[in-house]
Image: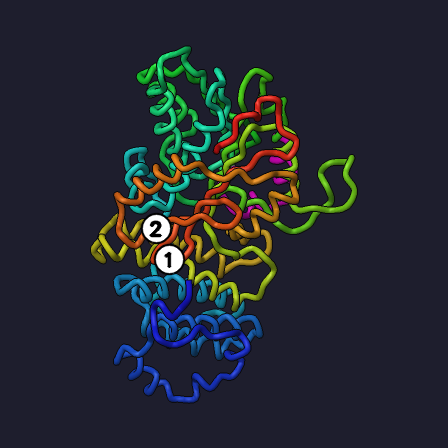
Amino acid sequence: MKADVRGKNPSPTISSMQNPSLFTNSRSSISSAVLTGCLDGACIEKLLLHCGSALESNDVTLAQQVMWVLNNVASAIGDPNQRLASYFLRALVSRASRVCPATMSFKAAGVPHRRLMSVTELAGYVDLIPWHRFGFCASNSAILEAVRGFPKIHILDLSITHCMQWPTLIDALGKEPEGPPVELRISVLSWRPPTPPLLNIPIEEVGQRLINFARYRDVPFEFNVIEVGGPLEEEETAASSSFYDFLLSQVNAAMVKVNADEALVVNIQNWLRYLPDEEISSLDSSCDGIMSYRDSFLELVGRLSPCLVTMVDEDCDLGAPSGLASRIVSCFNYMWIPFDALETFLPKDSSQRIEYESDIGHKIENIVGYEGGQRIERLESGGRLCRRMASAGFMSVPFGEETVKEVKVLLDEHASGWGMKKDEEGMLVLTWKGHNAVYAGAWVPHAPASHQNNLLV
């Protein structure tokens, strides 16, 4: 997403921001400029970049000057740029306060809301924009194609949306042509990343509801929870390398209970980003060298010999080693997308909109306000993910035309700004006004399992 969509000024580079000439005017002049509305999206981006550069160089005085200007334009109830700026301001204030106590009061957005939702509320949350449903639809269609003809299906589900993907798949299996009923088993980990949306019931109760729904649709169904230790609620707890070592130790055929007579699918939705990408010693004693937790995890997934791996995530690079300033710009240009999409159909005071935006604000605060193990939001673009999957021994499988049709039907239910395209790797990409938002891909191991004779096309 480029800033020229939101304003006429070109997007600045880091080198162009090293000159503090932006602040040669007095505060009164800047205030007048703010009041006359000259600070469009491109100007806000420039201010954020300047503030990030100041914080990187420990220039607290300059950072506070920039935050003072942002304070005059940010508004939690303004247009999409102002609302987004308010969450960035909060993240910057939080980061600066750990360097030097704040000497002024800022009107940043309030503390990001982290309310526990009911299942009904979560369904409405997921349906608000196609951010999640896009991945559900593409993945479910690919799964149905890949497992067609097999009597038993086992899905290892690694996601953050509390199994909201699966009622649609169960319903589709219940509508299959007459024949022996397909047996479906879904396994989930007892741990999920400490990130919204949050649910007010345990995963075991979610599983029971799926069991009841599957019984209603006459689909034989089993739900398993793989225990990976005690409950982990805080980012600091989940950030230790020992925890990730233990987490990945659970990804094996014995713990997942993979049976030889079932088609195994590994479904990964907005989950891989929470594994650290820093290089570590290989978890496998038979391998030399070093690799990241993400690479180790994908290697372990390959050893499960799945007939399909589906992967969905947000299409933005925020995890690669980079300075704070460039990370802020990438984040601002990307997070503008849902803020702008919500503006098209929800009023400024909508409780649904405020809650959705506050969850994005929670991510922004983690991306901008923290470093090291505490920064758990480390997005990876679809292009980088494709290269990672290839290095891990997976081959991309293009989505079939039926999947494309189903996704298009889904997007027709939403605002006209949403669209879809296929990239050169065969992935489907959800777009907003032509800019990449979410990608969905399907892969198989290069050494296919015995039941991998049924591809997607």
The magenta stretch is: 232-250
Secondary structure of residue under mark 2: strand
Q: Position of residue 303 (x, y in %)?
A: 65, 30
Q: Are marks 2 and 1 in contact (CB under 8 Å)?
A: yes
Which residue is pictured at 35% across the width and 75% down the height? 8
First in sequence: mark 2 or mark 1?
2
Q: Which residue is mark 2?
A: 419
Instruction: Indicate yes or no whether the magenta region holds residue 234.
Output: yes
Which residue is pictured at 55% across the width and 37% down the height? 443
Q: Which residue is mark 1?
A: 434
Q: Nearer the viewer, residue 65 or 175?
A: 175
Looking at the image, residue 8 sits to the left or right of residue 142; the answer is: left
Secondary structure of residue under mark 1: loop
Q: Which mark is residue 59?
A: none
Which residue is pictured at 38% across the width and 75% down the height? 43
Q: Position of residue 403 (x, y in %)?
A: 40, 36
Seen in the picture, residue 239 relative to 219 is either above or below; the reply is: below
Residue 251 visible in image: yes
Q: Nearer the viewer, residue 232 or 323?
A: 323
